[in-house]
Image (cartoon, rainbow, N blue to C red):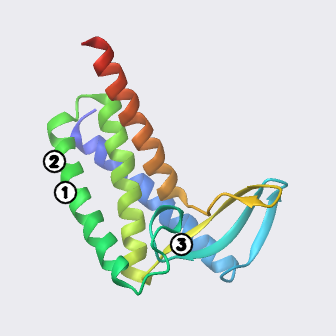
Amino acid sequence: MGLAGWLVLSLIILIVDQATKISIVQRLDVGESQTVFDFFNIVLVHNRGAAFSFLANESGWQRWFFTMFSVLAGLVIFWLLQKSHKHNLFASGLALILGGAFGNLIDRLWHGYVIDFLDFHLFDFHWPAFNIADTAITIGVILLLFDEIRRVGKS
């Protein structure tokens, strides 16, 4: 796939992420939860930090730090995609990370926080709420790790 194809994948991730967040915000109030399965809820959370609410309780500087980090990461990922768009596993990982990073970037710029809503739990243990962008980033990182393991295995 060419560079444009990978950018379209990133755009699809971004659109799905934003559409699901808009849908949740229209249906729930902050902190409200709806049970879907015994182990899964939809809950509206405003995350002012990063993954798993890292630095969420800071004074506000983290918004701009994570915003700048996302912009810089996006530029590096775009550059890497330009150079490596023919390496499918590597490029797909980068495209997923790019779409997810920009999905959360839009939240930070627009709202000042990231909208999270997927809540998996087992008894009283709840995994920190997350969203489609976080899922894409996680899958993208896993693909990059698989690509690296495969590349090292060929050496």
Looking at the image, residue 101 sits to the left or right of residue 24; the answer is left
Up-down: is 11 above or below 108?
above
Sequence-wise first label, 1 or 3: 1
In the rendered image, residue 65, in percent from the top left (x then y), is placed at: 30, 74
Within the image, what quadrant is residue 20 found in? bottom right
Query: Are the residues flagged by discs 2 and 1 in contact, CB closer than 8 Å?
Result: yes
Residue positioned 16% across, 48% down in the render: 79
Up-down: is 124 above or below 82?
below
Within the image, what quadrant is residue 31 found in? bottom right
In the rendered image, residue 88, in percent from the top left (x then y), is placed at: 32, 29
In the rendered image, residue 132, in percent from the top left (x then y), is placed at: 53, 57
Sequence-wise first label, 2 or 3: 2
**Hey, what amino acid is under mark 3?**
Ile
Q: Which residue is mark 2?
A: 79
Q: Which residue is mark 3?
A: 115
The residue closer to the viewer here, 11 or 41, is 41
Up-down: is 133 above or below 28?
above
Residue positioned 39% across, 47% down in the render: 96
Task: Tell me the element at label 3.
Answer: strand
Question: Which residue is situated farthest in the top direction here?
Answer: 154
Task: Tell me the element at label 1.
Answer: helix
In the rendered image, residue 78, in percent from the top left (x then y), is placed at: 21, 50
Looking at the image, residue 152 sits to the left or right of residue 48; the answer is left
Query: Are the residues flagged by discs 1 and 3 in contact, CB closer than 8 Å?
Result: no
Residue positioned 35% across, 20% down in the render: 150
Q: How far apart in space, not on screen, are marks 2 and 1 (Cα)?
A: 6 Å
Q: How far apart in space, not on screen, are marks 1 and 3 (Cα)?
A: 23 Å
Q: Which residue is mark 1?
A: 75
Mark 3 packing: few (<14 Cα in 10 Å), some, or many (20+)?
A: many
